[in-house]
């Protein structure tokens, strides 16, 4: 099963310390610039080869730059029996308090 969640819902999960596995699907450079606290970086092109890193017993929440890649991944993983959620609009739309910047906001470009 997969679900589409808002950034506000993700913040609620993180506030409540819900046992989830957060995946940032953007490239490593974009991840280094900014990501949601606690996210593991597994770029879109590496998901199939790194599937063994994903837990079967926790909700897997995925996001990418603006949504399509993580939505496809959430649906695919759900078809394999994982419980997944996709953050609507990706990091581009996320306005939550768990966003961590490591470079100037002026220099941010998603991937």
Image: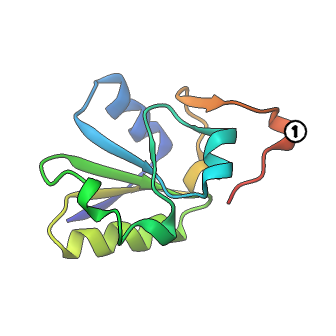
Q: Quadrant of the N terminus?
A: bottom left
Q: Is residue 89 above or below residue 98?
A: below
Q: Is residue 16 above or below residue 25?
A: above
Disc 1 element: helix
Residue 25 coordinates in the image, percent (x, y): 50, 58
Corner quadrant of residue 77: bottom left
Asked if residue 62 lies left or right of residue 81, the reply is: right
State the residue at coordinates (36%, 23%). 15
The residue that mark 1 highlights is 106
State the residue at coordinates (58%, 43%). 94
Q: Between residues 74 and 31, which one lies in front from this camera angle? A: 31
Asked if residue 14 lies left or right of residue 64, the reply is: left
Q: Between residues 47 and 1, which one lies in front from this camera angle? A: 47
Q: Quadrant of the C terminus?
A: bottom right
State the residue at coordinates (27%, 40%). 20
Residue furthest to the right in view is 106
State the residue at coordinates (12%, 48%). 57
Residue 58 coordinates in the image, percent (x, y): 18, 46
Residue 18 coordinates in the image, percent (x, y): 25, 32
């Amino acid at each position: 099963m997969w679900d589409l969640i808002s950034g506000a819902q993700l913040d609620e999960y993180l506030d409540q310390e819900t046992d989830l596995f957060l995946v940032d699907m953007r490239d490593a450079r974009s991840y280094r610039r900014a990501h949601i606290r606690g996210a593991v970086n597994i770029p879109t092109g590496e998901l199939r080869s790194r599937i063994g890193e994903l837990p079967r017993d926790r909700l897997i929440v995925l996001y990418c730059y603006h949504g399509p890649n993580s939505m496809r991944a959430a649906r695919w993983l759900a078809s394999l029996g994982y419980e997944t959620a996709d953050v609507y609009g990706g990091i581009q739309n996320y306005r939550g308090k768990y966003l961590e910047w490591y470079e100037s906001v002026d220099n941010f470009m998603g991937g």
